[in-house]
Amino acid sequence: MVNLIGEFGKPNVMSEKPPPIPARSFAFAVRIVNMCQELEALPGSSRILANQLLRSGTSIGANVEEAQGAQSKADFTAKMYIACKEARETHYWLRSLIETNLVPENRLAPLLDKANQLVAILTTITKNSRPTK
C-alpha cells in the first residue's frame, strides 16, 4: 500500500492565510516524490505510471518557481499556464492509478483534492495575469 506522507504543513486556522502558491506546489511535489518512490517498488505497470506522475507532479512547482523569476508579464503568464497544464496532467495520472486499482481511492483522495486546488489556483492566476482587451 502507498503511504501518502504529510499535508501542506500545519492545518489552516480560519484566521491564517493559505500558503503561497510556490510553497503549495513545492509541498505537493514532495508528496508526489514520496508516493512515486513507493510505486517504483511495486511490480508491473505501476512503475511506468509512477514515472509519468513524477514528471508532471514535480513540474508544477518547477514552473511556478520559474514564473517567480519571469522576465515579463507574458513570460510569467506562460509559465503559470504550463504549471496549470501539468497540474491537470497530474490529476489524470492520479485518476489512472485509482481506476486501474493500483492504489485505493481513499489513499489518493487527498492528493486528488490538492491537484484540483492547484488547477483552480493556477487557472485563476493565469486568467488574471493575461492582458485585458
Image (cartoon, rainbow, N blue to C red):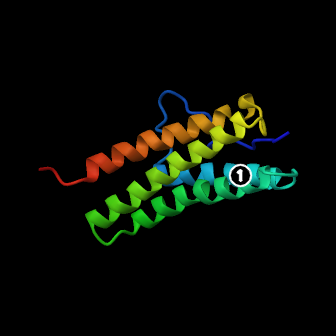
Closer to us: 90 or 12: 90
Position of residue 7 measured from the top left corner of the image (x, y, whole percent): 66, 40
Does residue 24 appear in this view? no
Which residue corresponds to the image point at 61% horizontal and 49% vertical from the top-left?
28
Which residue corresponds to the image point at 66% horizontal and 41% vertical from the top-left?
96
**Horizontal arrangement in the rendering, residue 131 relative to residue 9 (left or right):** left
For label 1, the crowd category at 10 Å Cα-Cα, with few meaning under 14, some 14 to 19 and many 20 or more, is some
Closer to us: 21 or 35: 35
Label 1 element class: helix
**Horizontal arrangement in the rendering, residue 131 relative to residue 37 (left or right):** left
Which residue is most to the left?
133
Quarter occupied by residue 1:
top right
> In the rendered image of this protein, does residue 93 appear above or below residue 99?
below
Residue type pointed to by label 1: Leu
**Horizontal arrangement in the rendering, residue 107 relative to residue 29 (left or right):** right
Position of residue 8 measured from the top left corner of the image (x, y, whole percent): 62, 43
| Residue designated by label 1 | 49
> In the rendered image of this protein, does residue 71 appear above or below residue 30?
below
Position of residue 76 measured from the top left corner of the image (x, y, whole percent): 34, 62
Which residue is most to the bottom?
71
Closer to us: 28 or 50: 50
